[in-house]
């Protein structure tokens, strides 16, 4: 039951983050490329990439919580391998995919 409650709380948070991401995406899309400075355009793009990276991590965490709650199956080892994120043109970030506490061998 505790695992289901964790999943529910995280899902609520994820839905809020999805809504924020959609607003940010729309705002970035509506920027006027002719009248906006290159720095402002780059910042908007970078913010969008960071938000998308966070959503990807949240998606992995949701899968992990779903496995722990018994709602999903464990995926193969390749799914849980390290992943590289590129939130900005000049920046690379290594990340690990969340692994379920139970069920993973």
Image: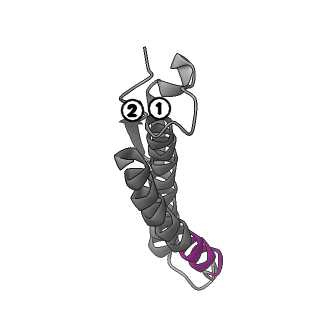
| x, y percent for residue 28 | 58, 74
Q: Which residue is nearer to you in this view: 53 or 32?
A: 53
Distance in Å between CA atoms under marks 2 and 1: 6 Å
Evaluate whether residue 47 shows in this view: no
- Residue 65 tag number: none
Q: Quadrant of the C terminus?
A: top left
> What segment is highlighted magenta in the picture?
22-30
**Location of residue 88 in the rendering, given as x and y in whole percent from the top left corner:** 46, 52
Predominant SS along the magenta part: helix
In this rendered view, identify the residue nearer to me: 58 or 26. 58
Callout 1 crowding tier (Cα within 10 Å): few <14, some 14–19, many ≥20: few
Label 1, secondary structure: give it. strand
Q: Position of residue 56 (x, y in %)?
A: 51, 48
First in sequence: mark 2 or mark 1?
A: 1
- From what the image shows, is residue 12 above or below residue 105? below
Measured as percent of width and height from the top left, residue 36 is found at 54, 81
The residue lying furthest to the bottom in this view is 35
Residue 70, placed above or below residue 2: above
Residue 29, quarter of picture: bottom right
Image vertical order of residue 39 relative to residue 27, above or below: above
| Residue plotted at (44% across, 53% down) | 54
- Camera-side residue of 33 and 85: 85
Residue 96 counted in the magenta span: no
Mark carried by residue 96: 2
User: Viewer-proximal residue, 54 or 7?
Assistant: 7
Residue shown at the point (40%, 60%) measured from the top left: 9
**Residue tagged by mark 1?**
83
């Amino acid at each position: 039951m505790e695992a289901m409650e964790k999943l529910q709380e995280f899902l609520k948070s994820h839905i809020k983050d999805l809504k924020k991401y959609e607003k940010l995406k729309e705002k970035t899309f509506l920027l006027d490329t002719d009248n906006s400075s290159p720095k402002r355009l780059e910042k908007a793009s970078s913010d969008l990439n960071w938000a998308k990276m966070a959503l990807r991590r949240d998606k992995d965490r949701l899968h992990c919580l779903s496995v722990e709650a018994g709602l999903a199956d464990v995926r193969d080892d390749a799914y849980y391998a390290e992943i590289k994120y590129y939130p900005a043109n000049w920046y690379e970030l290594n990340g690990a995919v969340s692994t379920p506490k139970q069920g993973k061998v």
